[in-house]
Structure formats: structure tokens, C-alpha cells
Image (cartoon, rainbow, N blue to C red):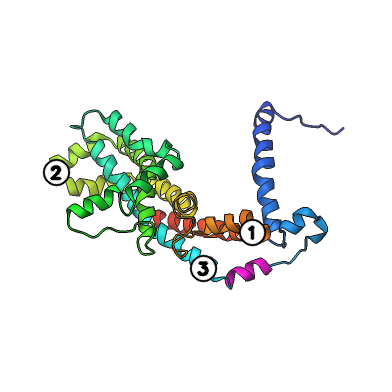
């Protein structure tokens, strides 16, 4: 007699969530991967008999597409400059707010976290005014210092740094909250023992704060890396990829290929290349942190 084991109560509690994840997360990923091996476009959307399986042709096209390499260079530039600035600003702000003599810590946490929950459209309106070449606040301040006005979003040399500044301002509050939580978990007695041994503030920061914040650094670094590699909303709203393609990102190129030109197979290939880049960066970061 064969005994059939009935599913446990835990299985039925987890099953609805796993079903939703499978339908709305795993299935679209698999479909997108299959799509990247086809020439799916607007014509195939109208008639399925126009759909062809072309293997790795989309990925070969990527290797010969100068527009993709421009977007790749812009994205790496944004990550290489913006991610360290965001993490550094978050850590510095967390250290300042976490000081015992600072009053109203909850107020400052709320104020610095507000940009994170503010919609990007509202942020873009404010920052486009700040960056306005004639009446913007930044150029007004520069004029008081005797410096010529800068076309922040129209100059190819300044467009990407301008987006980086805005992105750091909008996103550093999230990492700040994580760093504050990490600082709160460090026992105060360690600092008191270090003070008794004659260690100064910098030595305490180097020998106590940084090592014990390592898990927080791993989380913050990975989340920041993933978020910055997916740069899309800032150039889409502020510059539309210009000027001269200097703010075109991989995610924005994927969007334009898929939803502007309807090259959905090629856009799917771009998305998986971006996934492999993010996966490689995350793995390298975890390996470095572990060592």
C-alpha cells in the first residue's frame, strides 16, 4: 500500500505567494529570455507568422552597435561617480545625526528621507528650475561669484554630472536610514573602552565603526549598485538622453528600442545584458567585502 503524504499547512500558506511570484515574476523573465532570441517587432505583434527565431543575432548586433556602447559608457560613468558619492553622503549624514549631542534626530531623519518618497516628476520640475541656464538658482549663485552661467542640462560636459547631483540628493536618504540603523546596533561600551585606551575620534571610526558597519556596507553597496545601473527616470524626464546622447543609459536605450521603435526582441537582449552586468557587479562586490 502506497501512502500519499498530504501537503502540510505551511505549504498551503506559502503556495499563494509562490504562485503569484511564478506568474508575475518568473514567467515574464523566461518569456523575455525567449523573446531575446527572436526578431519580435511591431509586425510580429500584428501577425504571429512574422515572428522568427534568430538565435544570438540580437546579441551579436549589440556588440556592433555604437549606440549601445555609448549607453554602456554613460551608465558606467554614472555608477562610478554617483554610487560612491551617494554612499559617502549617506554615511557622513548618518554619522552627524547619530551624535549624542544632536537634538531632534527624528526630525532630521524625516527631512533627509523626504526626497526618497517624493515623486520624480516633482523633483524634476524643481531641479530643472535650479538648472535653468538664465533664471536658475545655481547660475544666480555663480553670477554672485563672478562665474559665467552654465547650461547644466544642455552642455554635453555638464549634463551627466547634473543628473548625478540630482540622483544623489534624491536617493541618499534611504542609505542614510540604513547606516543609522547600523550605527545604533554598535555597542556604546566599545567606544568608551577605546576612549579609555586613548583612541581619538578617527581611530574609533577606523577600528570600530567601519568594521562593525561591514554588513550594512554590503547591503547599501549592492542596493545602490543595482539602482544606479538601472538609470532611467532621471534622463528620461530631464534630458531624454541628450545632449548628443551623453545621458543615454542602458535602461533608456532598452525603453526606446522596445516602446518607441518596437524592436522588442532587441530590447529584451539589452535587458539581459544589463542583468548580467548587475549580477557580475553584485558578485564582485560581495567577494571584495567578504575578503
Q: Nearer the viewer, residue 41 or 85?
A: 41
The answer to whether any part of residue 214 appears in the image is no
Name the residue at 66% across, 46% down. 26
Dot 2 and dot 3 residues touching (CB under 8 Å):
no
Q: The residue tagged with tag 2: helix, strand or loop?
A: loop
The quarter in which the C terminus is drawn is bottom left
Camera-nearest label, 2 or 3: 3
Camera-nearest label, 3 or 1: 1
Give how far apart the Cα atoms at labels 3 and 1 are. 19 Å
Tell which residue pokes out farthest to the bottom in this image: 64
Q: Is residue 156 above or below residue 21?
A: below
Which residue bears the numbered disc 1? 261
Give how far apart the Cα atoms at labels 2 and 3 are. 54 Å
Q: Nearer the viewer, residue 74 or 23?
A: 74
Which residue bears the numbered disc 3? 69
Which residue bears the numbered disc 2? 197
Mark 3 / mark 1, whichever is N-terminal = 3
Q: The residue tagged with tag 1: helix, strand or loop?
A: loop
Mark 2 / mark 3, whichever is N-terminal = 3
| Range of magenta residues | 57-63
Name the residue at 39% across, 44% down. 171
Q: Is residue 177 above or below residue 207?
A: above
Dot 3 and dot 1 residues touching (CB under 8 Å):
no
In the rendered image, residue 38, in percent from the top left (x then y), is placed at 72, 62
Name the residue at 75% across, 54% down. 45
Instruction: State left or right for residue 90 relative to residue 257.
Output: left
Q: The residue tagged with tag 3: helix, strand or loop?
A: helix
Mark 2 / mark 1, whichever is N-terminal = 2
Main structural element of the magenta stretch: helix, strand or loop?
Answer: helix
Dot 2 and dot 1 residues touching (CB under 8 Å):
no
Amino acid at each position: 500500500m502506497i501512502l500519499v503524504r498530504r501537503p502540510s499547512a505551511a505549504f498551503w500558506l506559502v503556495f499563494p505567494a509562490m504562485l503569484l511570484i511564478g506568474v508575475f515574476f518568473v514567467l515574464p523573465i523566461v518569456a523575455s529570455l525567449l523573446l531575446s532570441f527572436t526578431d519580435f517587432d511591431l509586425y510580429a505583434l500584428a501577425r504571429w507568422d512574422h515572428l522568427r527565431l534568430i538565435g544570438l543575432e540580437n546579441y551579436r548586433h549589440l556588440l556592433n552597435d555604437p549606440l549601445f556602447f555609448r549607453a554602456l559608457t554613460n551608465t558606467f560613468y554614472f555608477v562610478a561617480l554617483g554610487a560612491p558619492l551617494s554612499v559617502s553622503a549617506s554615511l557622513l549624514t548618518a554619522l552627524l545625526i547619530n551624535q549624542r549631542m544632536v537634538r531632534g534626530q527624528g526630525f532630521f531623519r524625516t527631512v533627509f528621507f523626504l526626497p526618497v518618497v517624493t515623486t520624480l516628476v516633482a523633483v524634476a520640475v524643481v531641479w530643472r528650475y535650479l538648472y535653468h541656464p538664465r533664471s536658475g538658482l545655481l547660475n544666480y549663485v555663480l553670477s554672485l561669484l563672478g562665474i559665467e552661467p552654465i547650461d547644466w542640462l544642455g552642455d554635453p560636459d555638464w549634463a551627466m554630472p547634473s543628473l548625478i547631483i540630482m540622483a544623489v540628493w534624491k536617493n541618499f536618504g534611504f542609505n542614510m536610514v540604513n547606516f543609522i540603523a547600523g550605527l545604533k546596533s554598535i555597542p556604546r561600551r566599545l567606544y568608551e573602552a577605546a576612549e579609555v585606551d586613548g583612541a581619538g575620534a578617527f581611530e574609533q571610526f577606523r577600528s570600530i565603526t567601519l568594521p562593525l558597519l561591514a554588513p550594512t556596507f554590503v547591503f547599501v553597496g549592492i542596493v545602490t549598485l543595482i539602482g544606479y545601473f538601472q538609470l532611467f527616470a532621471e534622463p528620461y524626464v530631464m534630458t531624454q538622453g541628450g545632449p548628443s546622447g551623453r545621458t543615454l543609459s542602458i535602461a533608456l536605450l532598452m525603453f526606446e528600442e522596445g516602446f518607441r521603435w518596437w524592436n522588442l526582441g532587441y530590447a529584451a537582449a539589452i535587458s539581459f545584458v544589463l542583468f548580467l552586468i548587475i549580477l557580475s557587479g553584485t558578485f564582485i562586490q560581495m567577494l571584495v567585502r567578504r575578503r
